[in-house]
Image: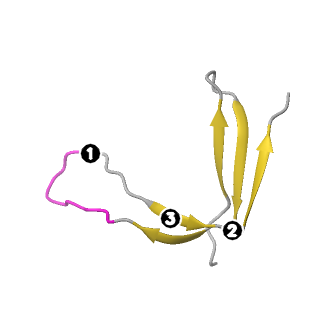
Amino acid sequence: DDYFPDMNIMYLDRDGYQLITIDFKQPIMKGISEVEMNYSSTAMEFRTFTVNFKYNRFDINIKTD
């Protein structure tokens, strides 16, 4: 398959209730930033990286009640 599974972003209000969902259909990964691996260290640490996607279509769903 050329596409990743559909992805979504959910916007929540301050109480954690879903307000808006954006569904990205048939996303394709176009790039990823450098990720350094250090196998000599056993300490757990969090590292960030960037992934770029393109998509064929997106749907915006707004909760109205």
Up-down: is 36 above or below 12?
A: below
Residue 23: give x, y in percent of width and height.
71, 54
Specify whether residue 17 is painted magenta: no
Earlier sequence position, callout 1 versus callout 3? 1
| Crowd rating for badge 1 (residues with CA inside 10 Å; few <14, some 14–19, many 20+) | few
Left-right relation of 4 to 61? left
Q: Which residue in the rendered view is the most extreme toward the top?
A: 15
Mark-to-mark CA distance, 2 and 1: 32 Å
Q: Residue 45 carries which label?
A: 1
Three-letter code, disc 3: Asn
Label 1 residue SS = loop
Give the residue number, with chain letter if any, for mark 3.
52
What residue span does the magenta drawing correspond to?
Answer: 34-43
Residue ID at (26%, 45%): 45
Label 3 residue SS = strand
Left-right relation of 15 to 30? right
Mark 1 vs mark 3: in front? 3
Mark 2 vs mark 1: in front? 2
Foreground residue among 48 and 40: 48
Earlier sequence position, callout 2 versus callout 3? 2
